[in-house]
Image: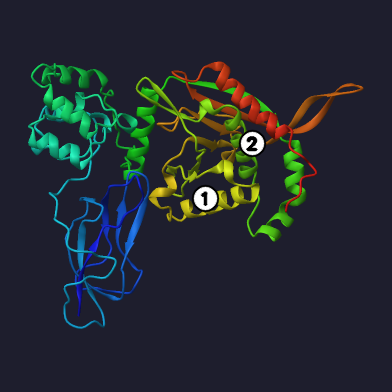
Amino acid sequence: MATIEILLPKMGESVAEATITKLVVSPSEFVESDEPLVEIATDKVDSEVPAPEDGTLVEWLVAEGDVVAVGQAIARFEIAGEGTNEASAPTVASAPAPQPARVDAPEIVAPSPAVVAAVSAPLDAMPSRTGAGGRFYSPLVRSIAKSEGVTRAELDGISGSGSEGRVTKKDILGHVSQRGTAVVATPVTMAKTSAASAAPPVVVSGQDEIVEMDRMRKMIADHMVRSVQTSPHVTSFVEADMTRIVQWRNKNKVQFEKTHGTKLTFTPLIAEAIVKAIRDFPGVNASVDGDRIIIKKQINLGMAAALPSGNLIVPVIKNADQLSLVGLAQQVNDLADRARRGKLKPDDTAGGTYTMSNVGTFGNVMGTPIINQPQVAILALGAIRKKPAVLETPDGDVIAVRHMMFLSHSYDHRVVDGMLGGSFVRRVADYLEAFDPQRSVV
């Protein structure tokens, strides 16, 4: 039988490595084609690596918790029904890749004296890919730091120019070249900083239940804390009259599904209005890079989705401004369905430029959402409720029952002022209220 090596597959443009979370198959165990061999996790989504063909797992070249680079061999696999071993490997596995040094998965723990002392430890004693506060370091940066004797304190003190403040190759090489003159935080300084920022101890009684955070919850916690620390949040609120949209959807949802094969929810209708408003106010579709504001030309609309586990994920509708209402509905339903089933791919959550979050799903009328870094704004959609509202008519003002919804727009006050942030959310409401009730479902 032919024995091949299973490589960690490419999982998207922005994904360079993954953590081995579970070895599903044991050595000597037979597996059928496309059955999962191993469960992996990136900094965006969880996924599986399937068997390329029917065969038997010979041995694992990795262990649970290992951080593995894309293209690295993770297992040896014997294909069923083949002749003697051959030098060539099938398309799923190319020539054996050199095995990089093992890198332990990040561990997030409560601040303690051990953590404070470890901040100044050399990199060879601390191979974790994350530093103080969960800051990410790529394998290349860690390798350079280790070879140059850069301590963890030095690494944590380098100002990163990459995405979300990450340290790049250029940053660390620049630091190394200037080490003779640069002022580096001492262990004492770092210890004081850590002690000052440490959360107060929690008293646990015998009746309390202790629940360990899973990997995704740790990532969410880190992402939210960093967002609040990075962006001064301001929130503007607008109430929109959704009556026309509610009546049109109630009248056409059955025909829409019959014609296009997908359900019509309120989400794509609101997404359509958001995209139109972004075209009018492109300043909210941006990111901050140091002293520069990067206005994104693509409109990649993220939609926050709650998972059955209680965690949160944000799949992205790519080029949302180029999609019709039907295309938006198909994308929304597909991404939401695959998010619930844990079938999202890394690329499905990458590249977002603006995010919407439907807090109305839980019966909430409004919220103050936290910005999804490195974006600069996020819009929360409240529950649509019937309530009395004043209408202006040619014969005077009247009170009528209308379907109303609050829009809550949180934005980064470093680059989005009240005029832009408030005008944008008002424009979204205007587009919703101006919806054409005679619109065709075709």
Note whether residue 131 is visible. Answer: no
Is residue 386 rendered to the left or right of residue 361? right
Residue receiving disc 2: 273
* Direction right: furthest residue: 395
Task: Give the residue type that dot 1 points to.
Answer: Ala
Residue at (34% x, 73% y) in the render: 33
The residue nearer to you, when weighing 302 against 168, is 168
Cα–Cα gap, marks 2 and 1 = 19 Å
**207 or 211, which is in the foreground?**
211
Q: Secondary structure at mark 2?
A: helix
Residue visible at 53% across and 22% down in the picture: 235
Labels 2 and 1 touching (C-beta < 8 A): no
Q: Measuring from the top left, give residue 242's x and y in whole percent.
A: 71, 35
Q: Position of residue 267 (x, y in %)?
A: 61, 43
The percent position of residue 387, horizontal first and vertical second, equals 74, 30
- The answer to whether residue 16 is above or below residue 178 is below
Q: Residues within 10 Å of mark 2 (few under 14, many from 20)?
A: some
**Nearest to N terminus: mark 2 or mark 1:** 2
Name the residue located 40 percent from the left edge and 31 percent from the top edge: 374
Residue tagged 1 = 336
